[in-house]
Image: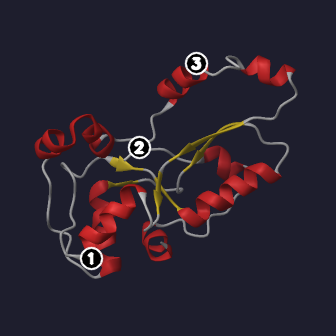
């Protein structure tokens, strides 16, 4: 599961980009939009693709202490936001593609249980996740409370802003 990495990794990747500096892009007259996306809620793959079968089997529950924020976005909204950014010539720079209200892992897993009508009582301790997943456990246990401020200010409207709507749409 790849998590939102935040500005530090974004800057690191930017410095290793062949264009290196924003000035190079501006001088080349190329409008550039940087997408920083949250966990995409979709049944077909990624982290959510692994979670749906566990929850359907009644084996879902919080990961770690459940207090870590998971910034998510419905697949439909992800595609619509990308289209919105492509269509608007006046928009450039970094944009967070996440739902308007980030939730904790505890809140997300409770919503999964409600929508799928299955109990969400199986908790996996952080130590177990670190032992099984190694470095990838940092993505699961890490917390990023990301808000799509610039995307909302640009006039984008989410079709599935809440977690339950996003899960149902998946």
At a point 20% along the width and 70% down the height, the residue shown is 120
Crowd rating for badge 3 (residues with CA inside 10 Å; few <14, some 14–19, many 20+): few
At a point 37% along the width and 55% down the height, the residue shown is 47
Residue of label 2: 2
Crowd rating for badge 2 (residues with CA inside 10 Å; few <14, some 14–19, many 20+): few
Query: Is 121 left, or right, of 167 in this rendering?
Result: left
Residue 54, by quadrant, is bottom left
Query: Is 134 left, or right, of 97 in this rendering?
Result: left
Looking at the picture, does residue 160 appear above or below residue 40? below
Q: Which mark is residue 20?
A: none
Looking at the picture, does residue 105 appear above or below residue 23? below
Residue 168, by quadrant, is bottom left
Q: Secondary structure at mark 2?
A: loop
Crowd rating for badge 1 (residues with CA inside 10 Å; few <14, some 14–19, many 20+): some
Q: CA distance from mark 1 to mark 3?
A: 42 Å
Residue in the foreground of this view, choosing between 149 and 4? 4
Q: Which mark is residue 16?
A: 3
Q: Secondary structure at mark 3?
A: loop
At a point 48% along the width and 24% down the height, the residue shown is 8
Looking at the picture, does residue 87 appear above or below residue 111? above
Query: Is 96 left, or right, of 48 in this rendering?
Result: right
Specify whether residue 155 is in view: no
């Amino acid at each position: 599961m790849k998590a939102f990495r935040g500005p530090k990794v974004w800057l690191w990747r930017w410095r290793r980009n062949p264009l290196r500096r924003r000035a190079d892009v501006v001088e080349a007259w190329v409008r550039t939009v940087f997408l920083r996306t949250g966990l995409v809620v979709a049944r077909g793959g990624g982290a959510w693709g692994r979670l749906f079968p566990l929850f359907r089997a009644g084996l879902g529950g919080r990961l770690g202490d459940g207090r870590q924020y998971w910034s998510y976005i419905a697949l439909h909204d992800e595609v619509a936001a990308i289209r919105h950014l492509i269509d608007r010539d006046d928009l450039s720079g970094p944009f967070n593609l996440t739902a308007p209200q980030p939730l904790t892992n505890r809140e997300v897993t409770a919503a999964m249980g409600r929508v799928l009508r299955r109990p969400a009582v199986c908790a996996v301790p952080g130590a177990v996740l670190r032992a099984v997943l190694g470095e990838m456990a940092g993505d699961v246990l890490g917390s990023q409370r990301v808000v799509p401020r610039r995307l909302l200010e640009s006039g984008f409207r989410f079709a599935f802003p809440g977690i339950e709507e996003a899960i149902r749409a998946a």
